[in-house]
Image (cartoon, rainbow, N blue to C red):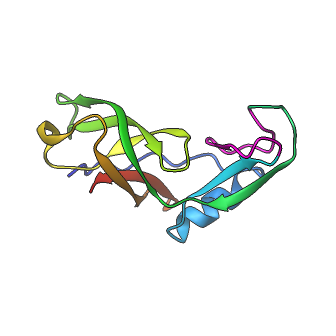
Amino acid sequence: MDTRIPPSPQVWPETAEYWAAANEGRLLLRRCCDTGRAYHYPRLHSPFTGSFNTEWFEASGTGTLYAFSVLPRAQPPYCIAYVELAEGPIMLTNILTDDFDSLRIGQPVRVQFVPSADGQRVPMFVPC
């Protein structure tokens, strides 16, 4: 299993609610109220329309492995990946596993929150 401690994220006023929810074990996304489309990384304006007509909502925490790369020479080895969330957005993250050879595109994954260097929990994913 990946035993690296992730770097601490920079918490900005517009992302404070996202990181507070992560500390509670909840994954939040933003939704554009004009289009109904969810997006990640959270920001106040919609990447689809530029509008500030957006809202927070709790994501399911599930998705599928969209793309990944294993860094076997890193100490410890780890996997960086894009996960397509069930709600639609694609999120850059890490996959936590001891068996990199079993990873496959389209594989179901679920969120797991890992403490960063300062204790802020960061969403990563594990295979289902």
Residue range (magenta): 34-47
Instruction: Using residue 104 as the reference point, say whether residue 16 is left or right of it.
Output: right
The percent coordinates of residue 57 (x first, y second) are 67, 60
Residue situated furthest right in the rendering: 52
Q: Which image quarter: residue 88? A: top right
Using the image as rendered, state which of residue 20 and residue 32 is in the foreground.
Answer: 32
Residue 18 is at least partly visible in this image: yes
Q: Can you say whether 25 is above or below 13 in the image?
A: below
In this rendering, the count of numbered labels is 0
The percent coordinates of residue 28 (x first, y second) are 61, 58
The percent coordinates of residue 21 (x first, y second) are 60, 65
Q: Can you say whether 95 is above or below 101 in the image?
A: below
Residue 117 is at least partly visible in this image: no
Q: Which image quarter: residue 95? A: top left
Residue located 20% across and 52% down the image: 1
Using the image as rendered, state which of residue 128 and residue 77 is in the foreground.
Answer: 128
Using the image as rendered, state which of residue 86 and residue 125 is in the foreground.
Answer: 86
Residue situated furthest bottom in the rendering: 24
Residue located 25% across and 48% down the image: 2
Instruction: Using residue 124 as the reference point, say whether residue 77 is left or right of it.
Output: left
Q: Is residue 91 magenta?
A: no
Q: Is residue 45 magenta?
A: yes
Would you say the magenta stretch is mainly helix, strand or loop? loop
Residue located 22% across and 32% down the image: 74
The percent coordinates of residue 49 (x first, y second) are 82, 31
Instruction: Using residue 94 as the reference point, say whether residue 51 is left or right of it.
Output: right
Residue located 26% across and 57% down the image: 128
